[in-house]
Each structure stands twice: as structure tokens, then as C-alpha cells.
Amino acid sequence: MVKIPRIRFSISKYVNMFYHLCVLFSEYFPDEISLGLLNNPSYQQKHGHLKTGKLHLLFQSLQEHSFYTWDFMGLPLFETDDMQHANRILMNTSLKVSQLWSEIYQEALNSYEDIWTQTMPKLKAFASEFEPHWIPVQDSILTKMAGIAKSSWKTECVNVHFVDCIRGASAWISNVALAPFPNMDVEKKLLAHELAHTLVPDYSLKTKLRNLGLDGTLAHTITDLIAYFSIKEHVLEPEKRGIKPNPSYYEHVEELCQVFEQCYKHPEKYRTLDQVLEQIKP
């Protein structure tokens, strides 16, 4: 029997406030994020008056340390060639970033209270509507996903946080931020996509692709196909836009779809994900 994680749904004021701030100040984030997950012009326009001068200064101060992990850890090392000194610099940098985010939260908290008062009931109502659609099919989806990906679940629990202001969803290892979408089947697909990222992390999938001489950029397409074939039996219109992978967004999806459809129909033919990926090479 395949061991699958528990899915726990949450509605957190502070998770929502974090993304509220990130959406409002998206210009301080890399394009991949600011033009994707945080790209919500109507929300930015509605709440733009909350972008105070002090918050701008705090976000500008964060830029000294960057939002990229490799920058955050690497830039301080430019200041020394002594490891003990480097350790002290890294610890001080970590403390500065934590203090800056703490100041950002404190500065924004009061102004977010009214927004949360309106947001919380909507998220609770959505969660109450979505859970009956997801929970009865959850075990089947997660088991099917592990079978298609030829991978075992490493985490025991995934926390899914409903977030009002983002576009789409995002996975942070064992945590998922998920925007409410009115179509329950599309919401299933959004969640399944992020769970597939959790099951087969990008770093692992890209390594496998490159070892086979394939382009690592195919990873996003493969992740979405794993999600699609996992939920296909549990949606009313599997060909619907927002459910079936979009060829204009996912590279080589039509060719890769044939490979994963074979894995979906004949799982006994493949023992590992590498064997599935090898079918792409021809």
C-alpha cells in the first residue's frame, strides 16, 4: 500500500498578510515571481495607498541582502577571506534580514486588519465549499500521482494555505499557498500541480533530465502532466482550459503528453521515473 501524506487546509491571517505585502511590493522581487504569482494589478490598485514611505524604505533595505538564497549567503563572503569572520558576517546578515521583515510586519499589521476582516469569511466559505470536492478523491489522486511519478512521498503532511491575493499557487516543500478559484475542478488541478512539485522537486527532476541529455526546462511541463493524469478521473471535463496542460504555456506538452499517457495507462511497464523520461529521447 502506497503511503501518502495528510493534506491539512489552513486559513492564516499572517500567511495572507505576508503575500499581501509581497503583492503590493512586487517590484522588489525577481521577475519570475513579480510577473507570476504576485502579479495582481487590481489588488495593487485597490490597496496601493497602503504602500507607505516607511515600508518602501524597509523593502529597499532588504535589497542590500537580496531575495535570492544564493545572493543572501554569498554576498557577505565578498567582504572577507577568513572563515571565522565569514561566519560572523553571515550570522549578522541573517539577523538583519529577520529584523527588517519583523519591522515590515509590525508596520503593516494595523493597516491589514480591515482587509483581513473582509478576507477571512470569504476564505472560510471557499474552504468549506472546496474540501468536500477534494477530500473524497484525495487518496486516489495522491496514490495515482506517486504511481505516475514512480516516486514515494517523503513528507507526512502538506499544509495548504488558502491565500486571497495571489495568482495561482506556490509550493514551499511541505507547504502550499493556494489561491481560491471558483471552478472546483480547476482548483483541484492547481493543488495537484503544487503537490506534484512537492513529490518530485524541480532540482531532482532537472538533474534527471540533464543526465539523460534532455533540456531541464521540460521539468515544468512534466510536473503539470503528472498532476493532470493524477486528477483526470476526478474532474468533469478533463479537456477543459485550466485543467489540461496548455500548449501555449508548457513546452512540448503535446509530445510529452503521449509519453505520460502511456505511463498512466500501463504503469506496470515502468519501474522508475528515469525509465519514463527515457521515452522522451526519441
Image: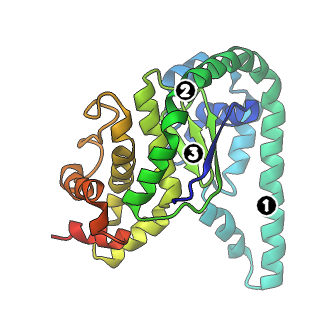
Query: How many residues crowd around disc 2 within 10 Å: few (fewer than 14), some, or many (20 or more)?
Result: few
74 sits left or right of 102 in the view: left
Q: Which residue occupies the foreground of this view, 124 or 62?
A: 124
* Amino acid type at mark 2: Pro
- Please give the label number shown on residue 94: 1
Is residue 194 at all visible to an observer of this figure? no
Towards the viewer: 50 or 187: 187
Report the mark closest to the observer, 2 or 3. Answer: 2
The residue at the point 79 percent across, 60 percent down is 94
What residue do we see at 40% from left, 59% from top? Answer: 147
Which label belongs to residue 132? 2
- The mark lying in front, picked from 1 and 2, is 2
Q: Position of residue 135 (x, y in %)?
A: 55, 35
Q: Residue at x 51, y 45 (%)?
A: 139
Q: Is residue 208 above or below residue 114?
A: below
- Of all residues shown, which one is farthest toward the left? 282
